[in-house]
Image (cartoon, rainbow, N blue to C red):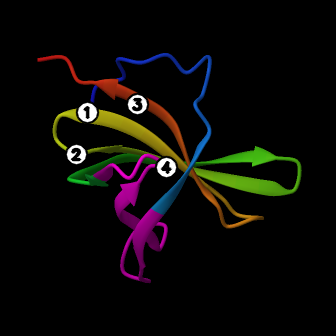
Amino acid sequence: MNQSYSYQNPLHEPIDVDATFSRSYLGHCRPIAFRTNTGREVQIAEIGLVHPRYDGLKTIFAFDVTDGSTDYRITLDSESLCWYLDFEGDQYA
């Protein structure tokens, strides 16, 4: 996955996410698709880096994902259990 976008100004757009939860998957959570407010649906083809970020006592889980043509960073707020699209960018060939 190529980080071709800037992390300086996150979108922080609320999204709907389809995910599976399993003890056998690293981190126990695996997003498989998401929908934006405009109704666009993205099928996740690959998950890259998954990492927690701490904001006081709250943990934000960041998932760097791709649909095969565009990279995204989606985040899960562990306190509100809301998902957000923070970054979107095209991959370089």
Image quarter of residue 20? bottom left
Q: The disc labelled 2 sits on which kind of residue? A: Asp
What range is drawn magenta here?
17-41
Mark toward the start of the polypeptide (4 vs 1): 4
Number of marks drawn: 4
**SS at circle 2:** loop
Q: Which of 14 and 56 is in front in this view?
A: 14
Task: Tell me, yes or no, whether the two marked residues, 1 and 3, touch with CB atoms within 8 Å.
Answer: yes
Whether the magenta-drawn stretch holds residue 21 is answered as yes
Depth order, front residue of 5/22: 5
**N-terminal-most mark, 2 or 4:** 4
Quarter that holds the N terminus: top left
Mark 4: give few (<14), some (14-19) or many (20+) Cα within 10 Å: few
- Report how far apart the C-alphas of labels 4 and 3 lie in the structure: 14 Å
Tell me where residue 27 appears, x and y as whole percent.
Answer: 49, 67
Q: Do the residues labelled 4 and 3 touch (CB within 8 Å)?
A: no
Q: Which residue was labeled with disc 3?
A: 88
Residue 85 vs residue 46, the one in the foreground: 85
Q: Name the residue under label 4.
A: 37
Q: Residue at x 23, y 24 (%)?
A: 91
Q: Which of marks 2 and 3 is nearer the N terminus?
A: 2
Circle 1 — which element?
strand
Q: How crowded is mark 2: few (under 14 residues within 10 Å), some or many (20 or more)?
A: some
Residue to which mark 1 is pinned? 70
| Gap between marks 2 and 3 measured at Cα | 11 Å
- Give coordinates of residue 93: x percent, y percent: 11, 17
**Precedes in sequence: disc 4 or disc 3:** 4
Q: Marks 1 and 2: CB-CB under 8 Å?
A: yes
Give the CA separation, mark 4 to mark 1. 18 Å
Q: Distance between the residues labelled 1 and 3?
A: 7 Å
Q: How far apart are marks 1 and 2 (CA)?
A: 6 Å
Residue carrying label 2: 67
